[in-house]
Image (spheres, coloured by chain):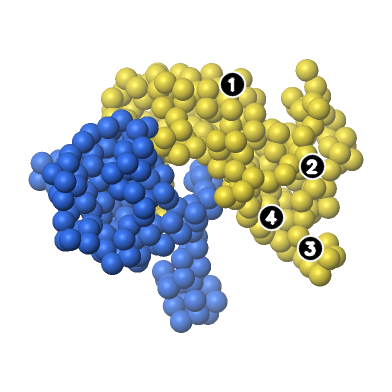
Chain colours: A yellow, B blue
Amino acid sequence: MASLCIPELSEVPTRITPCPILEAILEVRFVTSTPWSVLPGLLFQQIRRKYGDPKDLPLVSLSEEIRRSEPHFTYLPLVSFEGPHFSIRLGPRVISLSSRGAYPGWSAIHAEMSWLVERIRNAGFFGEGERLGMRYIDFFEGDLFPSLRIRPVCADDGVEGVEISMTLAFEREDFQARLILNNSVAADIGGQVRNGSIFDLDLSLGAGQFDFFDNGLGRFESAHRHNKEIFFGLLQPEFLSTLSPEYD
Amino acid sequence: MDILAPTAPYTTSSHFLSGTGDSSPGRVRCFEPGEAARERLILSKLGKSGWGRWQYFRQCFSGGWGERRQKPLSPRSQEVFFSTLATLDIPEQATPSLFLTDDGHIELAWRDADGRAVQIEFGAATSELYLESEGFEATVPNRDLPDLLRERLPA
């Protein structure tokens, strides 16, 4: 897979207003010999001080045989633990931490993930890491494509005024990046449905590129840096200037 | 919303269940973004049968399995398997087979021109090579596997 030539900014903003981040998710996929039936209990013992009882997600109602036979279900979580600012979701091969409500900022997410890594270690079910991923979903009202430095072209002319959904997969140093751009989505924001565009960026590492308990947090840090560089690098400078960028 | 890099199979019209909407798994597979290179590699080197075996192992042997609770398929074993496969020259007449060991390792095996077994077991940290024709068996750290294969299995 090739890399994508993304313009480098001399300085990357630390904040823009309004904050477009709908959701931030840090996820690790793993294998384990521990049966699924006891995983939620093992994790809950470790996180009960901050998170509520496990709540079943819809997929849990399907039989294990059906879940295992359908590849799309392999990495889906089956239960969630809700805390005041974050959700932890757990499945037979995945655990994720995601922000709830307003984006709390990278420092808060990193601190929570740092705490969670130790809880996962103590729970003792984590066998071997398979994939480490970070996904940020940003929402903008209206059509985002004219504000991007990447856009579809038809017969040498830019495509405008049509519904566009595109996915790009590319390399970014050690990471695999998957960027989804869509200008025709509806998002639930603060209880209100709004139409607009998403900038959905997922960065991941394969099994040989991380050791969850050894360097997982550092790898998430790197993913976050790449995420910002890609996101801001692909915004048109004129558009970025309308978002009141703040720099350290 | 918490699924990272979801897969979405593309389906042909003969498999549509209701108009152009929902569809059942079809004959055309759209690889997970970023996975296309690996899927192409195993298809080209091991054919549909090898590709199918790998899909089966990764899908159905991810947790403890078997009567003795054998180990799940090791993600690192897969990584070494794929990096090795990219450089491996398997004779055209050979019919390579894939196995999953009790330790959760992928094992690739075929028979050489004289019908003797060639086996490579890809572990998380070390890998094993067995050549029946030479009575040779060795276990090496994964970083040394490419050199060993170059030496023992020249193109």
Residue A95 at x, y = what percent?
Answer: 41, 35
The answer to whether residue A212 is above or below residue A20 is: above
Q: Return the residue nearer the eye: B17 or B95.
A: B95
Mark 3 chain: A
Which of pointers 4 and 2 lies earlier in the amino acid sequence?
4
Looking at the picture, which amino acid does disc 4 mark? Answer: Asn
**Quarter-wise, where is residue A52 in the image?**
top left
Can you tell which mark lies on residue A182? Answer: 4
The residue mark sitting in front, 3 or 1, is 3
Asked if labels 1 and 3 touch by Cβ distance under 8 angstroms, the answer is no
Q: Is residue B102 visible?
A: no
User: Residue visible at 72% across and 44% down?
Assistant: A5
Looking at the picture, which amino acid does disc 3 mark? Answer: Val
Q: Is residue B12 left or right of residue B82?
A: right
Local crowd size for mark 4, using a 10 Å CA cut-off: few (<14), some (14–19), many (≥20): many
Which secondary structure, mark 2? loop
Marks 4/2: CA–CA distance: 15 Å
Can you tell which mark lies on residue B102? Answer: none
Q: Is residue A5 left or right of residue A158?
A: left
The residue mark sitting in front, 3 or 2, is 3
Residue A54 at x, y = what percent?
Answer: 36, 34
The residue mark sitting in front, 1 or 2, is 2
Q: Which residue is mark 3?
A: A153
Asked if labels 2 and 4 touch by Cβ distance under 8 angstroms, the answer is no
Which of pointers 3 and 1 lies earlier in the amino acid sequence?
1
Q: Which residue is mark 1?
A: A108
Looking at the picture, which amino acid does disc 2 mark? Answer: Leu
Local crowd size for mark 1, using a 10 Å CA cut-off: few (<14), some (14–19), many (≥20): some
